[in-house]
Image (spheres, rainbow, N blue to C red):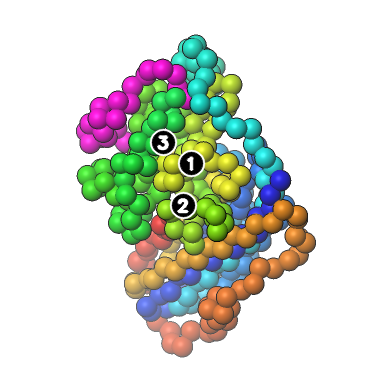
Amino acid sequence: MNFYSIRHLTRFRYKDPVSESIMETRMHPRSDHNQHCLSFSLSVSPRCRVFSYRDQYGNNVQHFDIPGEHDQLVIVAESLVEQQAQVDVPAFLSPDAWDALDAMVADGDYGEMLLPSTFAQPTPALLEMARKLNVVRRDDPLMVVHELNRSIYEYFEYVPRSTRVDSPIDEAIASHQGVCQDFAHTMIALLRHIGIPARYVSGYLYRSREDHDRSTPDVSHAWVEVLLPHLNWVGLDPTNDLIAYNRHIRTAVGRDYADVPPTHGIFRGKTDSELYVAVHVEASMDPPPLDRKLPIPDDWSVLVERAQQPPERAIPMLDAQQMQQQQQ
């Protein structure tokens, strides 16, 4: 059994003050399977009232409205998560696994995880990649999934900021480089192409000194879950060629990134914005006190303090709006 303390800080800084921000976040870890969220808090500066609901995929969503003028928005999410050991994923399944998978799909409600979605499209570039990697129904579904996880890991080079949050998968396929979001979207689209339900997972990956993951440790992470007979949903991390075991902390699942961005909102005003994100995950074998706070780096506390100060000058209310999303 492992326990993880997580702090996720997001700061939006505006070149000129804005008159209103409306935001929703998906940073509250899920409680399902082997994972249980013991505590969660969301702090927002400027201060406001935060509301919560569950979306159609069972994700915990917080949303808020800041109607007053401000030149900075700071969001700090703090979580304590318990994870129990998982059963090892085998190398292969029984000879009738394809038939068993088709029966599961016919009897269940998995259509959304089989159809193309915003960022997981069967483009000509993807279909050509499927041909090169021999992504077809052969052997058994689990063997194909294992092989594809490794193939995508080898196909792409992990390069931070090489793509944008709204980049289509064709950009990563053409350049052979991307971030975890691109790895996940490509794998999802390839799996759906051969009739395997696949969904996008947003969350965090804990890294110890002994781990050698190539994904960036101080940001949120993304990976894939695949529906398989006898195993249900199995997590795979093509960015790091891993099975998603106890180091992967799940916050939200959906068809692709469009369903689960950590932050998603609009502001009223006409100005440029700057996004800063920092994530810290700490592990322990014993449960820390529920009221324990992680050490806050000096720059974080300064951010919160500055965000609570009144703006230096006022500007007229404008009607322009801009989407804000967070790269994984």
Residue 99 sits above or below residue 326 on the image: above
313, above or below 43, in the image: below
**For marks 3 and 2 on the same chain, the one whose residue lies earlier in the sequence:** 3
* Farthest-out residue, front: 210
Q: Amino acid at mark 3?
A: Asn
Which residue is denoted by mark 3 in the rendering? 149
Report if the CB atoms under discs 2 and 1 are less than 8 Å apart. Answer: yes
**Numbered circle sitting on residue 242:** 1
39 left or right, relative to 301: right
Q: Residue furthest right?
A: 289
Name the one closer to the observer, 31 or 59: 31
Q: Amino acid at mark 1?
A: Leu
Of tags 3 and 2, the one toward the viewer is: 2
The residue where tag 2 is placed is 213
**Majority secondary structure in the magenta region:** loop
**Magenta stretch bounds:** 114-142
Tell me residue 105's x, y (percent). Answer: 50, 20
Q: Residue furthest bottom?
A: 312
